Image: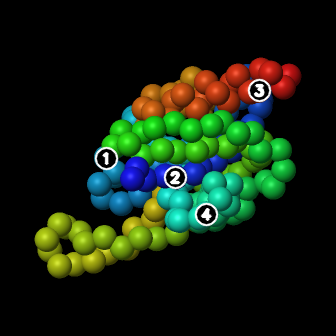
Amino acid sequence: MPRRSAGLFLYAVDPGGPRVLLVHPGGPLWAKKDDGAWSIPKGELEEGEDERTVARREFTEELGSAPPEDGWIELGEITQGGGKRVTAFAVAGDLDAGAISSNLFVLEWPPRSGRRSQFPEVDRAAWFSLRSARPKLVAAQAALLDRLADALAGSG
């Protein structure tokens, strides 16, 4: 059974066009990766969980503040490498990317050392234009930028 996740783009529309908030995964495996490593805040669904609930929870855990409650746009589902299916939403809002506070995870590091260390699930967040976000995102998530652009064009 493929793993399923749900996530949420926070976006803002400026005079220069829309921009989105992306997160960079924390931990030593991602420390030196940039292009193709960023993502929407997202997390795995447990049996019986609702996608919106998971997207809201993961946003809050990874960024340290709750997302706006109203005005969510459904962006549909994409399939990432390895078969993980991600259901995504977008909502207009603002957040200070430099002030995030992520939850932590434990990892044996270095591998086979017996030492366990804590790392932030997200080590940083940043705002990107839709164009500059594309190379930063995990490849399969780039389709979500197109869906967001279409949704915003249709609402304006």
Amino acid on which the number 2 mark rests in the picture: Ser
**Circle nearer the N terminus (2, 4):** 2
What residue is rendered at 54% in x and 28% in y? 143
Q: Are marks 4 and 1 in contact (CB under 8 Å)?
A: no
Which residue carries the number 4 mark?
49
Query: Badge 3, how many Cα within 10 Å: few under 14, some, many 20+?
Result: few
Could you tell me how far apart the alpha carbons at marks 3 and 2 are, in whole angstroms?
24 Å
Q: Are marks 3 and 2 in contact (CB under 8 Å)?
A: no
What residue is rendered at 48% in x and 44% in y? 85
- Regarding mark 2 in the picture, which secondary structure is present there? strand
**Circle nearer the N terminus (1, 3):** 1
Could you tell me how far apart the alpha carbons at marks 4 and 3 are, in whole angstroms?
28 Å
Say above or below: 62 vs 107: above
Which residue carries the number 3 mark?
152
Foreground: 27 or 89? 89
What residue is rendered at 70% in x and 22% in y? 150
Could you tell me how far apart the alpha carbons at marks 1 and 3 are, in whole angstroms?
33 Å
Q: Position of residue 27 (x, y in %)?
A: 36, 60
Specify the label residue 32 is tagged with.
1
**Circle nearer the N terminus (2, 1):** 2
Amino acid on which the number 4 mark rests in the picture: Glu
Q: Nearer the viewer, mark 2 or mark 1?
A: 2
**Circle nearer the N terminus (4, 1):** 1
Foreground: 40 or 89? 89
The answer to whether residue 86 of the structure is visible from this angle is: yes
- Regarding mark 3 in the picture, which secondary structure is present there? helix
